[in-house]
Image: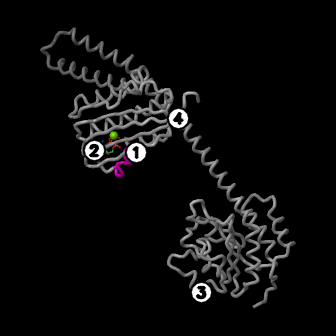
Amino acid sequence: MTTLATKTQLSPEWIVRIAQSLAGLVDLRAAVTAMSDELSPLIPHDHIDVALLTEDRASLVVYETGLETTWGTRLSPVDLSPIRDILSGRSEHMIFFDAVHDDRVQFRGADTGPIQKFGLRSRLHHKIEISGTIVGAVSVSSLQPNVYSSDHLVAINTVANVIGPYFHALRTSEVAQQRAVELERQKVLRIEAEHLVDVQERERERIGMDLHDHVLADMSRLLRNLDEVSLSRDQQVKDARKGLSIAIQDIRGIVEDARPTLLEMFGLGTAAEAYLMKATKDSSALGVMASPPEAADNLHGLVHRERLLVFRIIQEAVNNAVRHADANEISIAIEPSDETLAVHVKDNGVGFAVAHGTRQSGLTNMKARAAIIGAALDITSQGSGTELLLTLPLRSMDA
Ligand SMILES: Nc1ncnc2c1ncn2[C@@H]1O[C@H](COP(=O)(O)OP(=O)(O)OP(=O)(O)O)[C@@H](O)[C@H]1O
Ligand SMILES: [Mg+2]
């Protein structure tokens, strides 16, 4: 085995060179590579990585060069990391003469795949600390055993102090960028979803109007014609009249659903109350409006689409209570405050296992609609009934 020349201390020139090699690099991987090149004559290595803790401090994101290991391709859980003692603050540094056969990295579940696979025998690690907080570690590894000495440890300590703040800053900016991209993506998704809702609603309105203006009118005329043909003893005509009347009723219902005119004309409180009363009329449950409907009619903090989606969510909750709960009371309370709107739909029926219902379309639709308007939807259900709570921010009037 060759002896490796080392320097006990990093000279100021080296420190400047390392710092200079990083200057201007904004990509973390490129920065690790630049650092690796500068360190090679000083701390021999086949692999070098900078591992940084994620914001929740539960995982590590690893930037590496020299060898491509699984550490660099996915988040690694801190608990299973071979350098967990450094990350938890138990040790400032670690040195392995032959990590492949070292008990310290052989704990249960340890993420040591790359050590075994590549034979990373000599390993040297040092914490990266910023303002007293450990933010990660820098690690160098060699395929040869017994490479690193306490001299190298002194050098890696200096390296960690020099490069630590730089890598930390790059990582912070990378996270901020990723967050901005994610926010933008969500915004686009939301705009698309809002657009879809508008298109759907316009289509519903169009269908409603067509049904009303054409189909309903034609059917009503047909019914009147049948009335005029006074063949009331003819059973077939009687049946046809009955069938037609039922069809007309049904279509009226569809038209009403497609055009939430009450909602547009009077507002959310009145429309919700009317819907509740209509839905419970022929059921065993009593519909109770538990808050004054007028108080929720002029909600200036909600735009049309938001009002409509809240109404649709209330409709589905009421429908579910009527159809599935076997309740004797179904109540709605719509409570606006300065900044938020809270909508409660409650029944005292049989309840259900909420988690098991999520694949169903009604519940899924409610969730999707709540997400579109940035509302929190909470459904709790026990044997004694079900309660839906929808909470959404109201825009300030002067916004
Ligand atoms: N208030 C409730 N009381 C009791 N069970 C309920 C209640 N709301 C929902 N459920 C249960 O959850 C299931 C899923 O509800 P969901 O609204 O997703 O579907 P659905 O009402 O069966 O069909 P649809 O797609 O027409 O809404 C229901 O089938 C019912 O078993
Ligand atoms: Mg349903």
- The quadrant of the rendering that contains the N terminus is bottom right
Counting residues from the start of the chain, the first of labels 2 and 3 encountered is 3
Mark 2 vs mark 3: in front: 2
> Circle 4 — which element?
helix
Q: What's the CA distance linking mark 1 and mark 3?
A: 52 Å
Q: What's the CA distance linking mark 2 and mark 3?
A: 60 Å
Asked if residue 356 lies in the magenta stretch, the reply is yes
Residue that carries the numbered disc 1 in the rendered image: 378
Q: Using the rendered view, name the quadrant where residue 228 is placed.
A: top left
Residue that carries the numbered disc 3 in the rendered image: 101
Counting residues from the start of the chain, the first of labels 3 and 4 encountered is 3
- The quadrant of the rendering that contains the C terminus is top right
Tell me whether the residue at label 3 lies in contact with that at label 4, contact meaning CB atoms closer than 8 angstroms.
no
What amino acid is labelled 4 in the image?
Glu
What amino acid is labelled 1 in the image?
Asp
Residue that carries the numbered disc 4 in the rendered image: 194
Q: Which mark is residue 385?
A: 2
